Amino acid sequence: MAAKSSKAKPDKAARAEAKRERKAASKQRRQQIWQAFNLQRKQDKKLIPIMVGALLLCAAVAFGIGLIFGLQWVLLPLGIALGLLAAISIFGRRVQRSVYGQADGQPGAAGWALDNMRGQWRVTQGVAGTTHLDAVHRVIGRPGVILVAEGAPHRVRALLAQEKKRTARLSGKIPIYDIIVGNEEGQVPLRKLQAHMTKLPRNITPKQMDILEGRLNALGSRAAAMPKGPLPQGAKMRSVQRTVKRR
């Protein structure tokens, strides 16, 4: 009995500690969301009117449908709940659009966007690059190998071609896709990069991804160290480039 009691105490303490950690994490997420909301509403004057409009519209539609069947007071709470979900979705999309808008065109932005992708994507940043902070990133996913370039188009096209040759030597018949991030014709805008990649066909299995990753890791990197995430507006490019050259 004493042994069981001694085991029960650590288990109880561990559960209590896990519960405290979950509460702390939940509180932190709520604080982050509230901070993001306050920042966004200051920059985006249409945010609150659109969110309120979505809530009222959903509630009004549910109430109207309820009137037809004499269930208006039953359907109204459902309409409010759907309106809240719609408002939250609108908030999330506008925040995302704002974040991508600020990062667009900054060195390191494409690598940052790739690192934030959800799902089974194996991202290796800066497999090729220049001292001008042009870069090619390699992604392994169900479509195969995706080479994502950012920087001046006339420089990154040559980088992409060279990296594609290196990759093809080890990838065999696995498809290789190449993408240049930008807003010109034939390029993929930063905000659409994730959606563009998820629409690519599934050509290989997770097991093949593991094998391919092991092979391609042997290639190493031909790029100088890249900044982690988009460079902030106003960053001194010369000093950053000098740092990259030293590395």
Image (cartoon, rainbow, N blue to C red):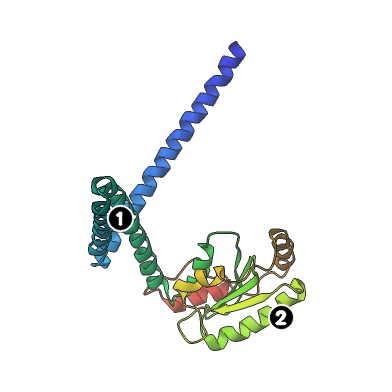
> Is the residue 193 above or below the residue 160 in the image?
above
Which residue has dot 1 on it? 83
Residue 10 at x, y percent in the picture: 54, 24
- Element at label 1: helix
Give the residue at x 37% y 60%.
Answer: 92
> How many labels were placed on the picture?
2
Q: Is residue 169 left or right of residue 76?
A: right
Residue 89 at x, y percent in the picture: 36, 59
Res 39 seen here: yes
Q: Residues within 10 Å of mark 2 (few under 14, many from 20)?
A: few
Residue 173 at x, y percent in the picture: 75, 74
Q: Could you say which is closer to the camera, residue 53 or residue 118? A: 53
- Element at label 2: helix
Q: Is residue 27 left or right of residue 139?
A: left
Among the two numbered marks 2 and 1 on one chain, the one whose residue lies closer to the N terminus:
1
> Is the residue 46 above or below the residue 63 in the image?
below
Residue, far top: 1
Mark 2 is on which residue type? Lys
- Residue 14 numbered tag: none
Q: Is residue 104 left or right of residue 174?
A: left
- Residue 165 numbered tag: 2
Res 227 seen here: no
Residue 241 at x, y percent in the picture: 50, 77
